[in-house]
Image (tube, helix red, strand yellow):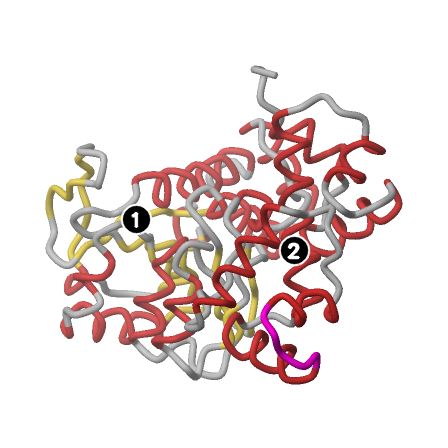
Amino acid sequence: MKSMKRRVLILVYPGFQLLDLAGPADVFGTADLLLAGRGYQVEPVAPQAGAVVAGNGVTVMAGGLGEVTGPVDTLLVAGGLSVPEHVRDPDLVEAVARLAAGARRVASVCNGAFLLAEAGLLDGRRATTHWLVAGELKNRYERVEVNADPLYIEDGHVWTSAGVLSGVDLSLALVARDHGHRLARDVARGLVVYLHRPGGQSQFSTPMRTLTPRSEPLRELQAYIDANPTADLSVPALAGRVGMSERHFSRVFTEQTGLSPGRYVERSRADTARRLLEVTGHPLERVARESGLGSPETLYRVFRRHWRISPGDHRRRFQSKEK
């Protein structure tokens, strides 16, 4: 019964990320199979109909944006390294806005969020994207409330997802919304993926995302903090190292890094703990001590606060085999 299917258009363009198409397409395709052909109809579309070469060189066939007629249930915009050049294409941006206006819901994978933002579809909404470009999205589109950690965000009828494979997480959530969690669970089991991955994408982003201070003494202080997690890193001690009053130091540090001194120290120590968990077999007591966090209880609280995952779970997922 073709008329009963939900029509999903996935927008691609030269240089798109193939997984941003393949992941969601397999989620919707598997759901359609389990629904005996009454679930979803997935259609790749592109600025021009025909062959479209992904960033990894694989070619897919897509229909043309200008040829789309009839109702659209979901418009999903793929990301890719070529997004920066495509957001400068007014015809493509206008086509995204036009199709979105007629769709029941709109979504993006990875930095495909930039195309939604350029079309004005994220104005006044919460959104996410790949952690590497979240700061750029926030700076470029001031009316978008960017949160770099969630794997996906729903705000009204607009959904955005984080980096690359989080498009699978997003698509499973859409299937669950349409047909219930039981079907989404069966799709996830069939594809051998998590239905709900624990934690956010910050667990995959090793560098701390902070601003680089303009002041050379503060840059040197940052390096000192990162290299000496077990030192006295209290505000009085840090202010003394740069010859400032505590109040002035706290204000200037926060202004130039985007984080308060205490928050920066905690994140630096947490990042040290994360590296120790990944490359050593040290017990949690030693990891907590060597990272400056003091106790396993503090280590656990910090991990849950920053990455919504326990230290043990992080170690099991990311620990190197070469210790």
Q: Nearer the viewer, mark 1 or mark 2?
A: 2
- On whether residue 207 falls in the magenta region, the answer is no
Kind of element beneath mark 2: helix
Q: Residues within 10 Å of mark 1 (few under 14, many from 20)?
A: some
Q: Which residue is mark 1?
A: 43
Left or right, residue 258 beside residue 80: right
Q: Is residue 105 above or below residue 40?
A: below
- Does label 1 or label 2 sit earlier along the sequence? 1
Q: Main secondary structure of the magenta part?
A: loop
Give the residue type at disc 2. Answer: Arg
Give the residue type at disc 1. Answer: Glu
Q: Is residue 137 above or below residue 152?
A: below
Left or right, residue 218 beside residue 273: left
- On whether residue 244 falls in the magenta region, the answer is yes
Q: Nearer the viewer, residue 115 or 172?
A: 115
Residue 245 lies, in percent from the top left, at: 67, 81
Residue 119 lies, in percent from the top left, at: 30, 76
Q: Is residue 238 above or below residue 150?
A: below
Kind of element beneath mark 1: strand
Q: At x 49% / y 83%, what residue is drawn?
A: 124
Q: Quadrant of the C terminus?
A: top right
Q: Which residue is mark 2?
A: 267
Can residue 300 be seen from the camera position used here? yes
Q: Report the span colored magenta.
A: 242-246
Left or right, residue 85 beside residue 179: left
